[in-house]
Image (cartoon, coloured by chain):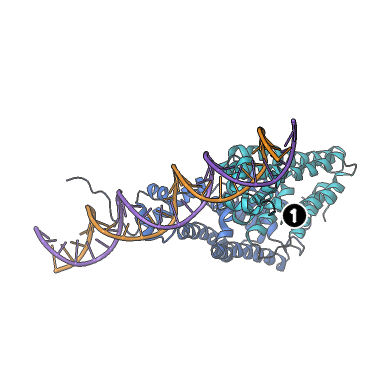
Chain colours: A cyan, B blue, C purple, D orange
Amino acid sequence: MPPPRFRRRKEKRPQEITEAALAAFAEKGYAATRVDDVARRAGVSKGLLYLYFKTKEELFKAVVRSFVVPRIDELTAIVDASELSSEEILRGPFYDFVKTLPGSNVSILIRLMIAEGPKYPDLLKFYWDNVVSRGLSSLNELLQRGVRSGEFRPSSVSEQPHLFVAPVLFSIVFKLVFEKQSLDTDRLIETQLDLLISHMKGYKA
Amino acid sequence: MPPPRFRRRKEKRPQEITEAALAAFAEKGYAATRVDDVARRAGVSKGLLYLYFKTKEELFKAVVRSFVVPRIDELTAIVDASELSSEEILRGPFYDFVKTLPGSNVSILIRLMIAEGPKYPDLLKFYWDNVVSRGLSSLNELLQRGVRSGEFRPSSVSEQPHLFVAPVLFSIVFKLVFEKQSLDTDRLIETQLDLLISHMKGYKA
DNA sequence: TCCATTACTGACTAGTGAGTCAGTAAGTAT
DNA sequence: ATACTTACTGACTCACTAGTCAGTAATGGA
């Protein structure tokens, strides 16, 4: 009796396929990725892939949903639950979190959002609502909490959480595009953090 | 006698075609742009386009070359020629320059480089050598000049010109991706500039 | 006015890849 | 064992587009 040609594993297929898709998109980008190739990576036929995902576009959306949202959940959970001071959260969990981003899976998806986003407005809205908006709100809450407690003085810095994110995005994009040119992304992010916190605390570094 | 079906205008065609291509790429991205559509926008047949540009890829490279490099030339020229102090250059010409970037043509090409760059290593090298590297060097030179003259104190900030660029890239990407969400990019860039200069001058803002 | 040159056209080809579907076999219940 | 359900396969189609090329007409020179 020959070994079975395939196993029926309904529950695990979708995740296996989205993982394969992430790897393929990361290598080639969305447009250049062949659905056939994703299926082969997942060890599955193209027909089966189309059973789980109606179109290539749906597959793309599923990838974003399943890999990015959990990461932002981590961050907001930390901010909401922690007993630490704002500065301690920024220098501890926040810094640890953002410095892992350049070079991670998530950074690849950020490239995809930049590249393909405009073609999929509803995906962009989903991404805005579930990732960007939540992340910025969380950060903003952290800064306001610091201001309310007297830890930080109010200033244009404490009103612009984007300043904390800018060097992170810069690092992500720089690493993605110019891999070979080395950039000390940790140092860049840390210097900016020092600078911002010093300013908010009202003394020079 | 009917009006002529077309005019022979050898000299102007390439520029007209690259302009049409920029517009098309801006709307749809590289992969989704049809060569036929670029030709029609330029008021030209596809055959003629292929007379001037061997492949779609060559067309893309020509677009990058002709729209980005001149902008960086402007900046380096200012830095090299100006008699102003480093701070005055940063707050004057540099600030004026970078705040025009979000929302400009160039920002669209930055999206294309992020999205398509990895597929075209030679284009990436060209872009690195002619744009990024030159821009960063120029900025670095400006900072070092400030340090040498005693205008700035040496610090981790004066060694990381990237910090001056990070909010600019952030603004560009943010505006491109989430057009509808408003972001005061001028304020973001200016706050960062204040912060960095204050730090380098050794007093708090 | 005629000729030579070449900028330019547009119909065509060849290749590709997203999505389909009729059939097959793994698992399950009886 | 047998019948039944459905996860799964893979060959096929159909639409689409980069790139070609034989032919056409605008121009300039004699």
Relative to the observer, which residue lies in front, C27 or B188?
C27
Amino acid under disc 1: Ser
Q: Is residue B190 left or right of residue D19?
A: right
Image quadrant of residue A146?
top right
In this rendering, the answer to whether A176 lies above or below A114 is below
Residue at the spot of label 1: B198
Relative to the observer, which residue lies in front, A158 or B16?
B16
Relative to the observer, which residue lies in front, A143 or B193?
A143
Q: Residues within 10 Å of mark 1 (few under 14, many from 20)?
A: some
Instruction: Describe the element under mark 1 as helix, strand or loop.
Output: helix
Q: Is residue A95 left or right of residue B185?
A: right
State the image coordinates of residue B3 (x, y, percent, origin top left). 22, 46
In this rendering, the answer to whether A96 lies above or below A85 is below
The single residue placed furthest to the right in the displayed view is A83
Question: Residue at point 78% right, 58% down?
Answer: B202
The total of numbered circles placed on residues is: 1
Relative to the observer, which residue lies in front, A60 or B99?
A60
State the image coordinates of residue B142 (x, y, percent, origin top left). 65, 64
Image quadrant of residue A204?
bottom right
State the image coordinates of residue B167 (x, y, percent, origin top left). 67, 51
Residue B178 appears in the figure: no
Q: Is residue A49 left or right of residue C5?
A: right
Residue A172 appears in the figure: yes
State the image coordinates of residue B46 (x, y, percent, origin top left). 37, 53
Query: Chain under label 1?
Result: B
